[in-house]
Image (spheres, rainbow, N blue to C red):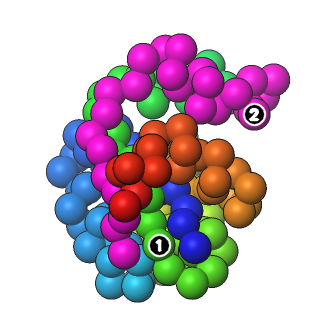
Amino acid sequence: MLTLAIIKPDAMASGKAGKVLAHLESAGFKVRAARLVSLSGPQAEAFYAVHRERPFFHPLVAFMTSGPCLPLALDRDDAVAKLREVIGATDPKEAAPGTVRALYAESKERNAIHASDSPENAGREVGFFFSDLDLG
């Protein structure tokens, strides 16, 4: 099963991308596709469209366009649920010890990594960044 993770601009800028990726691989995820991207405003708005009415939408778009990020198509059994477990709560202060966000996030807003929240969204999100050709 595939899911999407995005190593966000904060983790990229602070040099933590390799550590985050190693953490995911050590949790049993296989990278099926990866791409370094700098999202435009319209691209970030399209990706996060489900949050358009929420108060954090515009700050999130601004953050996600502030620097390069690294979308990853990840594969393993029960990928969506397992990735959510491995990355921890959105707020790193609430994230379990040893999770990606507990280890590498700066704050609730600058939380190092995005992960799909359902199998349906995982399919949509993987398709946003990767073609079937990319996924092999």
Identify the residue at horizontal 57%, vertical 84% (top origin): 77
Residue most toward the right?
Answer: 53
Expressed as whole percent of the image width and height from the top left, the position of residue 17 reads 25, 55
**Residue tagged 2:** 50
**Three-letter code for the amino acid on which mark 2 is drawn:** Val
Residue at horizontal 24%, vertical 56%?
A: 16
Q: CA gap, disc 1 to disc 2? A: 24 Å
Mark number displayed over residue 113: none
Q: How far across and how far down the image is residue 84, in percent?
A: 60, 69
**Is residue 57 positioned above or below 97 on the image?**
above
Is residue 32 inside the magenta stretch?
yes
Q: Mark 1 points at which residue?
A: 75
Q: Where does the image place residue 36, in percent across and percent down from the top left?
A: 27, 40
Q: Would you say the residues marked 1 and 2 are in contact, meaning their CB atoms lie under 8 Å apart? A: no
Q: How crowded is mark 2: few (under 14 residues within 10 Å), some or many (20 or more)?
A: few
Can residue 114 be seen here? The reply is no
Q: What stretch is highlighted in magenta?
A: 30-55
Sequence-first disc among 1 and 2: 2
Specify whether residue 39 is in view: yes
Q: Which of 107 and 13 is in front in this view?
A: 13
